[in-house]
Image (tube, rainbow, N blue to C red):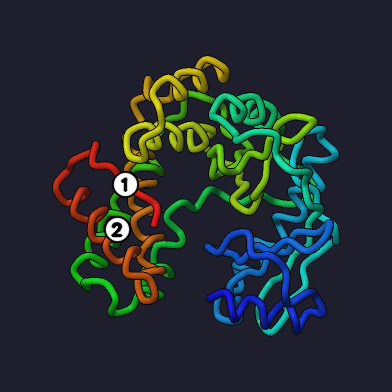
Amino acid sequence: MDEMRAREVLTAAGLPGAAELLALGENAVFAAGDLVIKVGRDATRHPELRQRAEREVAVADWLAASGVPAVRAAENGVRLVEGHPVTLWHRLPDPVRPAEPRDLAPLLSLVHALPVPAEFTLPRRELLGGVERWLTLAGDAIDPADADYLRERRDGFAAAAAALLPHLPPGPIHGDALPRNVHVGPDGPVLVDLETFSADLREHDLVVLALSRDRYGLDPAAYDAFTAAYGWDVREWEGCAVLRGARETASCAWVSQHAPANPKARAEFRRRVASLREGDPEVRWYPF
């Protein structure tokens, strides 16, 4: 899905086709007046994409009822427009500053204190579940040997993750716990991008920033501020390397879907695969 296709879906939905594009990734995210509109990828062959959008709206309502600061849905349910799930959200006030890791910690503490919701079912965190879809979307833009290598890693880490003994009690998690998924407005930090909410090992939420420290250049001092605010450093847990390896595999495969249309994504994909093949945990990974 590219921007042009996403705008066609907006028009078909009776929404402003000239809305401002905020982000283009797994979803196309637009701003239009007091609304934020998320256009998902075509769910015709992947019904899980519609289910994920439906669950995100349900999660927003549940968090509101639970008193957790988070983005709120502006419309109940999901519109299916020419095969694409479309959801509407209340637009948040302009941020007062960029979010930092320390802003994320108290929000995660609130989420991690919640019991599983009674109104709907949260899935397991299928961190590796998208690997096959992303590699398929990449097609012949990537080396088939690299795709096979990532599939092998996926299978190995999936088995290893299933055997982990957690340090924290399992339960609801955000699933993609990064500062980019926190918005710091006039009333403080709130969670956004709720589509990866799951019920699984709480350690999933904590490994994200540990990997950011090592792979994406997160300032070690900022990471230390996060662990101090949360109260525990997941790197002390013997299962950390397994969840880290699974996330690295997924992150690498995620880039592959952008390779057909984006030369920078192709180069970054090759860079990431090479670092995994060489077993170098400190090669810096970059956005594209």
Q: Which of 53 and 13 lies nearest the eye of the viewer?
A: 13
Q: Residue at x 18, y 54 (%)?
A: 274
Q: What residue is rendered at 77% in x and 53% in y?
A: 58
Q: Nearer the viewer, residue 30 or 20?
A: 20
What kind of residue is marked 1? Trp
Q: Nearer the viewer, residue 123 or 25?
A: 25
State the residue position of label 1.
285
| In this picture, residue 208 sits left or right of residue 217 | right
Label 1 residue SS = loop
Q: Residues within 10 Å of mark 1 (few under 14, many from 20)?
A: some
On the picture, is 204 further left or further right than 164? right
State the image quarter where residue 101 is shown. Answer: top right
Residue at 64% in and 33% down:
97
The residue pinned by badge 2 equals 268
The C terminus: image quadrant = bottom left
Task: Return the x and y of residue 275 as percentages of the image width and height.
Answer: 20, 48
| Residue 252 picture quarter | bottom left
When the figure is inspected, residue 156 is found, relative to residue 149, above or below; the finding is above
Q: Is residue 144 above or below residue 110?
A: below
- Which x, y percent locates residue 219? 40, 27
Of the two numbered discs 1 and 2 on the same chain, state the one appearing first in sequence.
2
Note whether 139 is above or below 48 in the view shown.
below
Which of the numbered marks, if any, corresponds to residue 277? none
Callout 1–callout 2 Cβ contact below 8 Å: yes
Query: Gap between marks 1 and 2, in whole Å?
Result: 8 Å
Mark 2 element type: helix
Q: Residue furthest left?
A: 278
Identify the residue shown where x is 31% and y is 56%.
155
The crowding category of the residue bearing disc 2, from other C-alpha atoms within 10 Å (few below 14, some 14 to 19, many at least 20), is: some
At which x and y percent is residue 278? 14, 47
Q: Which amino acid type corresponds to the residue marked 2 in the rendered image?
A: Glu
